[in-house]
Image: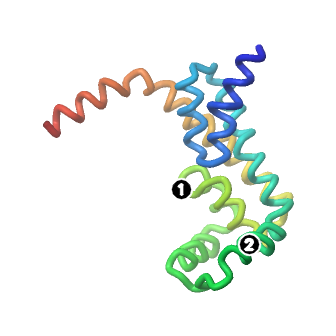
Amino acid sequence: MVEEILKAFSFSYLPSMIKFILGPVGGYAAQLHVVTSIISTVAGMMTVVTLIVYSGNWFRDQVINRLFPNRKRFSERNRNLTRIWKKYGLAGVAILTPLLLTPIGGALLAVSFGGQREKIMLYMLLSATFWSVVFNAAVYFFGQKLPDLLDWLLGLVG
């Protein structure tokens, strides 16, 4: 039991705090049960989201602004993030966080544009749960077929 928790913590929880897809991939690589991988992936993302939602303004003011005092306010990246926020709102940012953004990036974007804490937490939880089930199902289903797929792709190239 303790070994399973340590494996879930090391291979699924911690990686999903950095990049969401790393949780399901790490869970599969560590041969965790799919439900354990789903739960630890959601927990990893929500840990980061919770930390940023409740300390995001402080983090931005004390860390980001001090590390990068002369950063451009109107860079291409900032314009793209603003476009995403204006077009899709908080729900769109929550849906895109596991796909395109990192949990850190999505939470910082939501906090920066003034999303309400409770809504950010709810939307991110719903998104993390949905995408964790989808990604884990895909990784666990196609994981055994991956070597065959790679051999087939290499055969096409070579």
Q: Is residue 85 left or right of residue 48?
A: left
Q: Is residue 40 left or right of residue 95?
A: right
Quadrant location, the N terminus: top right
Residue 14 position in % (x across, y down)? 68, 39
Q: Secondary structure at mark 2?
A: helix
Which numbered circle lies on residue 32?
A: none
Categorize mark 2 by other alpha carbons within 10 Å: few (<14), some (14-19), many (20+). few
- Residue that carries the numbered disc 2 in the rendered image: 112
Give whichever of 4, 118 is nearer the camera.
Answer: 4
Residue 18 vertical position relative to residue 92 in the rendered view, above or below:
above
In the image as oriented, which residue stretches furthest toward the top?
1
Residue 61 falls in image quadrant: bottom right
Residue 79 vertical position relative to residue 154 in the rendered view, above or below:
below
Residue 109 vertical position relative to residue 73 in the rendered view, above or below:
above
Instruction: Name the residue: 64% across, 61% down.
Output: 105
Q: Is residue 121 left or right of residue 100?
A: right
- Residue that carries the numbered disc 1 in the rendered image: 100
Residue 136 position in % (x across, y down)? 57, 32
Residue 41 position in % (x across, y down)? 67, 37
Residue 140 position in % (x across, y down)? 51, 25
Q: Secondary structure at mark 1?
A: loop
Give whichever of 71, 24 is nearer the camera.
Answer: 71
Instruction: Name the residue: 50% across, 79% down.
Output: 76
Instruction: Name the residue: 79% across, 67% down.
Output: 59
Categorize mark 1 by other alpha carbons within 10 Å: few (<14), some (14-19), many (20+). few
Which amino acid type is marked by label 1?
A: Leu
Mark sitting earlier along the chain (1/2): 1
Instruction: Name the residue: 83% across, 66% down.
Output: 116
Residue 25 vertical position relative to residue 54 in the rendered view, above or below:
above
Q: How many marks?
A: 2
Give me the C-alpha separation between circle 1 and circle 2.
Answer: 18 Å
In the image as oriented, which residue stretches furthest toward the front?
67
